[in-house]
Structure formats: structure tokens, C-alpha cells
Amino acid sequence: QSQVLLQQLESLPVQQLPREGISACIFRVDGRISREVFRCVLQFLYTGVVQCGFSSDVCRLTELLLACMLYQLPKPLADYTQCALCPLLPTSPAALVLEVFNLASERTNTVEL
């Protein structure tokens, strides 16, 4: 569902993890995206259902919007994120609102709506 994510995963080398006794590819998520947010992304990619416990947390939703933009995640997840963010912006700090608008404008310029 995400060509960007798929390409990044396919280009990773397989590494031996002796402590775990397995071979695996190690994918490093952008440091600006928390585990909680990326877990929500993975759940959506596997199930098609948005399940996030941070729907009123403007910082986490901004991270989710960033993930949508960086990894070109499916439009329904990006739409959900923007809809959840909109009512929170009037009471959010100006710097955070500016970050959201910058991300949204980048998304509009790179993804067909």
C-alpha cells in the first residue's frame, strides 16, 4: 500500500541476529516518528482500520501526518489524520500549526488528492 515503504524494505540487507537466532532486515523509522505512531501505521497497513489512541494529541497526529508524507501512505490514513488535526489546530501552539500546514502543503504537492 506504500510504494516508498516497500522500496525501502526491499533494499535492506538481511542481517544475522545471533541473540535472537534469526535473520532479518532492520528498518529504521524516521526519528521524528514515535513507536506509538508507527504502530498505528502498521496496524492500518495490515488491517485497513485506523486504530490510534492519540486522536486528540496534536503532536502525535502531526507525527502521523509526517509519516503519511514521508512514506506516501494510503490516502484514507492521511485523510483521517488531517480530519483529526483540523479541530485541534485553533488551540495549538503557532509553531505546531505552521508545521502541520507545511506538511499538508508538501503532501498536496507530492500526492494526488
Image (tube, rainbow, N blue to C red):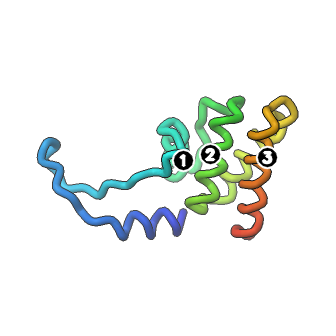
Image check: 95 left or right of 14?
right
User: Distance between the Cα atoms at labels 2 and 1?
Assistant: 8 Å
In the picture, residue 95 is in which quadrant?
top right
Give me the disc on residue 41. Answer: 1
Residue plotted at (60% across, 30% down)? 53
The residue at which mark 3 appears reads as 98
Query: Is tag 2's residue or tag 1's residue first in the polypeptide sequence?
Result: 1
Q: Do the residues under discs 2 and 1 have CB atoms within 8 angstroms? A: yes
Q: Which residue lies furthest to the front in this view?
A: 95
Residue plotted at (62% across, 44% down)? 63
Question: How many labels, in total?
Answer: 3
Residue plotted at (47% across, 38% down)? 35
User: Relative to the observer, which residue lies in front, 72 or 50?
Assistant: 72
Give me the disc on residue 64. Answer: 2
Compared with 90, 18 (above or below) is below
Q: How crowded is mark 1: few (under 14 residues within 10 Å), some or many (20 or more)?
A: many
Compared with 7, 103 (above or below) is above
Amino acid under label 1? Answer: Val
Q: Where's the N terminus, which quadrant? A: bottom right
Q: Residue furthest right?
A: 90
User: Distance between the Cα atoms at labels 3 and 1?
Assistant: 23 Å
User: Relative to the observer, which residue lies in front, 103 or 8?
Assistant: 103
Q: Where's the C terminus, which quadrant? A: bottom right
For label 3, the SS is: helix
Q: Which of marks 2 and 3 is in front?
A: 3
Q: Position of residue 105 (x, y in %)?
A: 78, 60
Residue plotted at (49% across, 41% down)? 39
Compared with 28, 56 (above or below) is above
For label 2, the SS is: helix
Q: How crowded is mark 3: few (under 14 residues within 10 Å), some or many (20 or more)?
A: few
User: Distance between the Cα atoms at labels 2 and 3?
Assistant: 15 Å
